Amino acid sequence: MEKAILNKLKERSTTVSGPDGNPLAVLSLSERDSLCRYFRLSPREVELHSLEAGIVPLRYLKNIGTLSVEGQRRLLSSKVAVVGLGGLGGLLVELLARVGVGGMLIIDGDRFAEDNLNRQILLHEKGISLVKARLAEKRVRDINSAIEVERWEGFVTEKNALHLFSSVNLVCDALDNISSRLLLQSTCEQLNIPLVHGAVAGFSGQVTSIFPGDASLSIIYGEKGIAVERGTEVEEGILSGAVGMVASLQAQEVIKILTGKGAALQRKLLVIDTERGEMRYIQLQQEEKT
Amino acid sequence: MKVMVKGFGAVRKYVEEKGNNVFEVDDLFSVRDIIKHLKINPDLVALVTVNGDRVSKDFHPKDGDEIFLLNMVSGG
């Protein structure tokens, strides 16, 4: 890091009591923006310099006790794709922007419909018929101006998938159909990156993290061609609380994988039915008994 | 033999319509036969566990086994 930047960061930071009770240097939003102008750097660049110097952007202070300064730096230097910006994806972009995932590629070719209002957090009544990806991008920018967000107003296809995801560290599956989910899995497999899967129906939902070689979605849904296209959500619909629960669990998976904290739900499907308050883990690695 | 059949969401509703979770079924029934016997749409059952272990639908449970049928879930 240039000495001039380091000196200015030290000069503009203040000290607060850190999560361990010791003094911790922090940088406010207004000081960050001032340094952006002074050095002609982006907000993300200034925040990365700051974290490298052990100075925590104040907005992330409540992350540090759990993630550490290095964990926060890893999040901010990562780029994540969120595919599908409906119920799950809408909340995922919100949670990832708040925690400080520094790069985001957000993808959806749809517009909001009135029957999305019951569960899709990006949608308000005046947003019906607006493009989902545009509202999502605005939401991310409103929450965290350090996030570098790219949007793709279209759908993932076999033709564009490899190109779309070539620059991301991780993909979030927030889709609503099985064949597209399987396409995400095969693309992530080829690019050697993890995929965080979530799906919901009625009161229930499921989450798992898929690493290259796992092919967990093929176990859950069957191989492409024999799988049905949708699940019991066609009959049950989707409740907002189930969406919030699953998107939140997906966000935690993303954070764990990018920071190396905790243990991801790898080869393990967490299934939850809030109608009865039940949850189970289904092991996906072993061969099924016949 | 008697088996306990559990499920989540739409699958559980099919099971519970029958009154309880315990069913008397033919000793030779596979999981697939039991799904058919309970008139559950087999396409809506994604995974099956018996006593917590993942099994194929061709698995033959034993008396007293707990069969869990995971509903196919793909909403977003």
Image: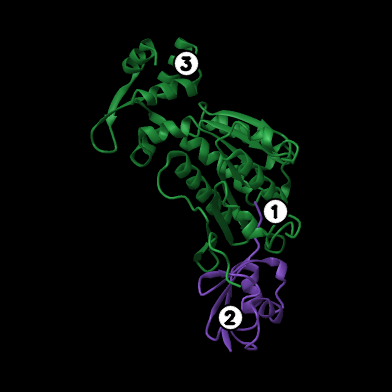
Are tags 2 and 3 found on a single chain?
no
Q: Few, some or many C-alpha atoms within 10 Å of disc 2 (few <14, some 14-19, many ≥20)?
A: many
Which mark, by number, is residue A36?
3
- Numbered disc in front, either 3 or 1: 1
Residue drawn 38% across the image and 33% down it: A70
Q: Few, some or many C-alpha atoms within 10 Å of disc 1 (few <14, some 14-19, many ≥20)?
A: many
Residue drawn 36% across the image and 13% down it: A8
N-terminal-most mark, 3 or 1: 3
Q: Residue A40: x percent and y percent?
A: 50, 12
On the image, which quarter does residue B61 sit in? bottom right
- Screen quadrant of the N terminus of chain A: top left
Colour representing chain B: purple
* Mark 1, residue position: A178
Q: Residue B48: x percent and y percent?
A: 60, 70
Badge 3 amino acid: Cys
On the image, which quarter does residue B6 sit in? bottom right
